[in-house]
Image: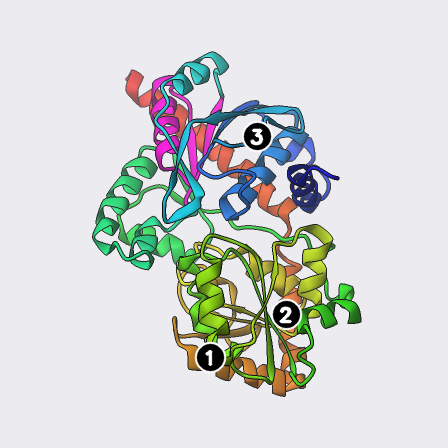
Amino acid sequence: MRDPIAAIIAAESSALGQPLPTEALCTAVQRVAIFTEAFLPKVDGVSRTALLTIRHLQRSGRQLLVFAPSPAPAQVEGTPIYSVPSLWLPSYPETRVALLWPPILERLQHFQPDLIHLFSPFTLGTLGMLGGGALRVPVVANYQTDLPGYAHSYGVPYLAPLFKAILRFIHNGCTLTLVPTSVVLAQLRAWRFKRLRLWGRGVDTTRFTPSRRSAAWQARLRNGRAQARGVALYVGRMAREKHLEALSALASDPSIALTLVGDGEHLPQVRQALCAGGGAAHFIGHLLGDDLADAYAAADVFVFPAVRETFGQVILEAMASGLPVIAADQGGSAALVRHGETGFLVPAHDKAAFHERTCQLLADSALRARMSAAARAYAEQQSWSAVMRDLEGHYAEAVRLQRRLLRRRQC
């Protein structure tokens, strides 16, 4: 049986396309230390972006040092991964919080990186930021997790100001902070974060494509609900901050076949919310690679009620698969969906609005076809190759800014 982590690495790596030409690379950066707060076997936006960046840097000939919370794979395509001791959260067992582990700084000093890249920095990222200052090398940080927003979703809103202050301290101690959408950039500016740059995400439009649509997968998604007009699909983790209870009106409507792909610690509560009182939501579980692409292509609309996303990679995958998207009008979703063109944005937590827009799209095949074509056209402009080319530009800018800072200190 194939190693599941190897399968994830292979599936994600294929999205990068051809390696960038040498002239597109930042040649001043040859040794990169990566600190990621989430990594395999967990699959989420942070771990996927970290993995794709690692594979890009490997293919461009860089030397890497990677720190990730335990448990992590021992290596990725020959690059060793240093598992940092971590704790799990009782209410969120999928997530590991790395400890402030002193040997990290010793390893970093021995490696002598040209640049440090932090992915959704918190505990590990704090050490990476401080290590970069001690070594006087540029530090680039991704803002990918809305911890202040999560505090509200998990019923501890009094922690939101503390999380905001911690994240501002970490990111303002870095050379550059990369944010995935203009919506997030505006939010962080309001929170007094400095040196912000846009760095989006890409999608593999060869794998995620409407051409994969098949009768077999349509039948699997319908799961016997023959009376339904079409399939409304959700893909993602079963987590509290996804607010999947907003889809309960869809689950209770026999004219809609609501199918959910994914797994997570909140799955029992999601089942209760969507299957109680006659709800008929169908849960497939976690899918990868071609199976995931086949599931997208077999659906008719994509529904995404999460309100705390900084980007929403699954939205881009759904659009590449030709699905109109119905999403909450907050966070990264609002930056990806063009209301009335590639889908609809509806008020957060509004069960009736999600139901109304889903019914509208399933009843109007001409509107659905127009939005499908527009969604696909938008996704075709978002290649991972272009995203990594932009990253090289951000690395080059970080190097310039760091050199300027060092010159000022010498004056």
- Spatial separation of the CA atoms under disc 1 and disc 3: 58 Å
For this view, does 311 lie left or right of residue 41? left
- Is the N terminus in the top left, top right, bottom left or bottom right quadrant? top right
Instruction: Give amino acid for label 2.
Output: Leu
Secondary structure, mark 3, is loop
Instruction: Give amino acid for label 1.
Output: Gly
Using a 10 Å C-alpha cutoff, classify the residue at mark 1 as few (fewer than 14 neighbours), some (14 to 19) or many (20 or more). few
Q: Earlier in the sequence, mark 2 or mark 3?
A: 3
Callout in the foreground (1, 2): 1
Using a 10 Å C-alpha cutoff, classify the residue at mark 3 as few (fewer than 14 neighbours), some (14 to 19) or many (20 or more). some
Disc assigned to residue 26: 3
Callout in the foreground (1, 3): 1
Secondary structure, mark 1, is helix
Instruction: Give amino acid for label 3.
Output: Cys
Q: Quadrant of residue 98?
A: top left
Callout in the foreground (2, 3): 2
Residue hosting label 2: 323
Q: Nearer the viewer, residue 7 or 26?
A: 7
Q: Earlier in the sequence, mark 1 or mark 2?
A: 1
Residue 152 can be seen, yes or no: yes
The magenta stretch is 114-143
